[in-house]
Image (tube, rainbow, N blue to C red):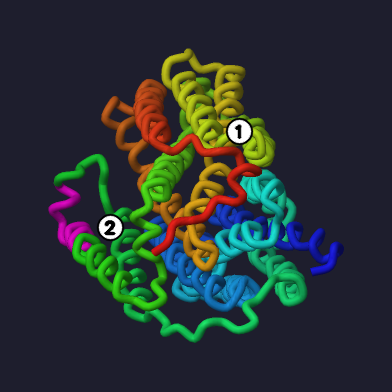
Amino acid sequence: MTPSESKALLPLLLLGVLMGAMDIAIVGPALPAIKADLAMDDRQASVLFNAYVLLQMIGTPLLAKLGDRVGARLAYITGIVFFAVGSLVVVVAYSPVVLYVGRALQGFGGGGILPVAAAVIATNVAPEKRGPALGMLGAVFGLAFLLGPVLGGLLLPYGWHWLFLINLPISAVLALGAARLLPTVKHPERLPLDLTGICLLSLMLAALVYGLSVLDVRDLAGSLARWPTALSVMLVIVLVPAFWMAEKRAVDPIIRPGLVASRPVMLTAIISAGAGLIQSGNGFLPVLAVTAIGVSESTAAWMLLPGVIAATISAPVAGRLLNTYAARSLILVGMALIIVSLLIYGFVPMSIPAFIVAGVIGSAGMGSVMGAPLRIIVLNHSQERERGAAQGLLSNFTSVGRLPGAALVGAIAASFGGGARGYQNAYVALAVFALALSVLALKLSPGPPTKRAAGARPPGR
């Protein structure tokens, strides 16, 4: 790779992640127009969300594994093509079912973009630059939630279809750039494809997503007694050990059992899932602002903007600090900021300044936790030929954590009578949960900074 190609590599990866993340951020502003145009009710809108999430979670490990087997170029282009085709199907959708298909294709393709990009950075970026580069990937998500509503406001007057049509030229640029810049495996090992693992994993994730989507956390016992939820739980219970045994027998498993059994990897994955739950629960912050302060819904949305900016800044800063400080230290600092933020929401009488200060503190902490530190730990404890799969595993744990977060906060708030006091109590509960995650993070090895960890050998099978 020439120096000019090396410089163009990171912008290419960041643009792909930005496109995928923005497509999540942009659906919210477009949803009212989509529902009106296709005569969809709220239940159909939830199916639209679940179709994307499910196929994203399936696409993440499969495309990440494809990258490990044949190189990042084919995996990245495959993800981009699925995403582009899905965008086109959404644009031409004439019924909710066609719309579901388009969003499912988008989810499958988008699921592979981030883990493949992270694996490329791990393989092709110098050790002292990996932290900042991975931090930039985290910053792109914050940037997407800044640009998403702005882009939605610019394009919605011309029709909601334009929000997805814009993905087509971007996808073409990304595919051409990937064909020129991304690495491939010259002579890939012709190991048998783990079809059993693929099928079991897909069924397990489908049961998990469906079970979490129909679970009523306000009536947990009653919800678990209903057959859709009970069947989903039973399927997950049965499929987890079946998948584990299949992966132990597979020549080239989708997820190496030794990776999952690695204590640092599993601790990191659990922390990532917990942070994802908190992140999802923060979706009720505008409701807190409306009920506690009395601002309008649009004003409450704008009050989140300083926090988004803080997350966009803190993620690359934390990545750069990985060259000086251990990942565990940055995770603990980030969790401390999240706890302080949640306690402000929970105990301080709400005002516009208090709300914004809490948002900036919490978002800065979330940017530190969810950015480079977690991904660096997984990279340091995975083999070179499974870096994509390891990053995919981390992404899926985050997604699983996000699924019940909002419902849990809503249920806690309702149990305290709703209103401002109910939501403040819910954020106190999240603060206690964040404290438990911090205790878990203390069990991570302190480890050296990225520069000194560059020569560490990952564990074997």
Amino acid type at circle 1 is Tyr
Give, as a single range, the part of the protein colored magenta: 222-234
Note whether residue 73 is visible.
yes
Query: Which residue is the extreme one toward the top?
Result: 349
Q: Is residue 230 magenta?
A: yes
Note whether residue 45 is visible.
no
Q: Work out whether mark 2 precedes mark 1 in sequence or the reverse, and give the earlier one.
A: 2
Q: Which residue is mark 1?
A: 325
Quadrant showing the N terminus? bottom right
Q: Is residue 360 magenta?
A: no
Discs 2, 1 touching: Cβ within 8 Å: no
- Report the mark closest to the observer, 2 or 1: 1
| Residue 309 placement (x, y as % from top left) | 68, 36
Question: Pointer 2: residues within 10 angstroms few (<14), some, or many (20+)?
Answer: many
At a point 33% along the width and 66% down the height, the residue shown is 206
| Residue 404 placement (x, y as % from top left) | 36, 46
At a point 48% along the width and 19% down the height, the residue shown is 344
**Front-most of residues 437 and 97:** 437
Residue 246, quarter of the rendered image: bottom left
Query: Going by the image, does 227 lie left or right of 422?
Result: left
**Position above or below: 380 against 47:** above
| Residue 185 placement (x, y as % from top left) | 62, 78
At a point 50% along the width and 62% down the height, the residue shown is 383
> SS for tag 2?
helix
Query: Which residue is the extreme one toward the right?
Result: 4
**Front-most of residues 294 and 152:** 152
Q: Which residue is mark 2?
A: 211
Residue 270, quarter of the rendered image: top left
Q: CA distance from mark 2 to mark 1?
A: 40 Å
Quadrant showing the C terminus? bottom left
